[in-house]
């Protein structure tokens, strides 16, 4: 197995160089560009030859620049028991992630559309790992006892469909709504889907 260039020799210095390249790439993303390795190297004041030792192509650079949000939950230790309140907290944090990391997430979306889907089996980075669905399922966890007949996974997928970077881009770029309004619409849509699921369960119980 090949050893990554930055894992040998002067590791600390190489880490600083890698961080400088990523910082430059993120700054270019923030400015609306989709940076190449060369552009990031020039912005960081690092030779292009050196930059290619860290990132052999644009895809690898952009994948590294995308934030790794590995939080298992968006709820704190004192999360409420009410499912609606829990969902509101998760959606508020999720839309904040979209706002904070919008340029990087837009780049991730472009990569996912331009490339064939990758799986963990081939050892390549995976852009779509379903973290948001896991966060939403966590918010819906009380339904397991209060409404066991609701398919929480299916409901989480439906909520995620209207609250990810894809929906954000459509609302901001196509529907031309403000980012504040986009976040509000996502939260309202999530609550509406929850209410509809609860209503269907209630109607089934009465039938």
Image: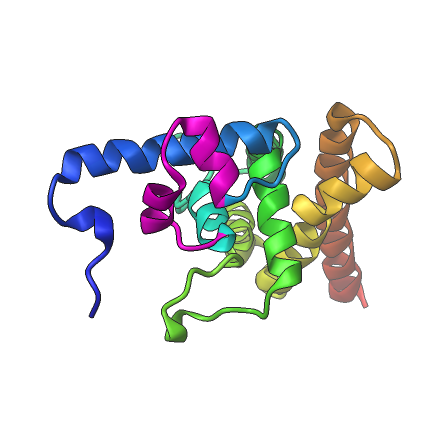
Q: Is residue 117 left or right of residue 49?
A: right
- Expressed as whole percent of the image width and height from the top left, the position of residue 40 reads 47, 35
- Expressed as whole percent of the image width and height from the top left, the position of residue 160 reads 65, 51
Where 13 falls versus 206 (above or below)?
Answer: above
Q: Is residue 3 left or right of residue 69?
A: left
Residue 8 falls within the magenta-colored stretch: no
User: Dominant secondary structure of the magenta stretch?
Assistant: helix
Where 205 falls versus 192 (above or below)?
Answer: below
Q: Residue at x 36, y 45 (%)?
A: 49
Query: Is residue 15 shown to the viewer in this render?
Result: yes
Q: Residue at x 40, y 41 (%)?
A: 48
Residue closest to the far bottom? 121
- Expressed as whole percent of the image width and height from the top left, the position of residue 119 reads 46, 71
In terms of depth relative to the viewer, which is nearer, 155 or 45?
45
- Expressed as whole percent of the image width and height from the top left, the position of residue 137 reads 53, 53
Question: Residue 149: which quarter of the image?
Answer: bottom right
Q: Residue at x 19, y 33 (%)?
A: 13
Q: Is residue 82 left or right of residue 203?
A: left
Where 204 falls versus 95 (above or below)?
Answer: below
What segment is highlighted magenta in the picture?
Answer: 37-57
Residue 43 falls within the magenta-colored stretch: yes
Query: Is residue 79 shown to the viewer in this render?
Result: no
In terms of depth relative to the viewer, which is nearer, 204 or 104?
104
């Amino acid at each position: 197995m090949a050893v990554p260039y930055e894992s040998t020799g002067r590791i600390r210095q190489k880490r600083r160089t890698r961080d400088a390249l990523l910082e430059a790439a993120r700054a270019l993303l923030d400015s609306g560009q989709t940076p190449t390795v060369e552009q990031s190297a020039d912005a960081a004041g690092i030779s292009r030859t050196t930059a290619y030792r860290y990132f052999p192509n644009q895809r690898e650079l952009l994948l590294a620049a995308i934030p790794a949000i590995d939080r298992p939950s968006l709820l704190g230790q004192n999360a409420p028991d009410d499912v609606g309140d829990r969902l509101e907290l998760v959606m508020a944090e999720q839309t904040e992630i979209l706002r904070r990391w919008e340029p990087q997430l837009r780049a991730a979306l472009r990569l996912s559309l331009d490339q064939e889907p990758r799986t963990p089996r081939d050892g390549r980075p995976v852009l779509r790992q379903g973290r948001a669905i896991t966060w939403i399922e966590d918010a819906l966890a009380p339904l397991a006892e209060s409404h066991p007949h609701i398919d929480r996974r299916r409901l989480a997928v439906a909520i995620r469909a209207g609250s990810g970077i894809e929906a954000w881009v459509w609302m901001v770029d196509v529907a031309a709504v403000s980012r504040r309004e986009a976040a509000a619409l996502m939260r309202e849509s999530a609550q509406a889907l929850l209410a509809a699921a609860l209503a269907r369960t209630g109607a089934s119980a009465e039938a």
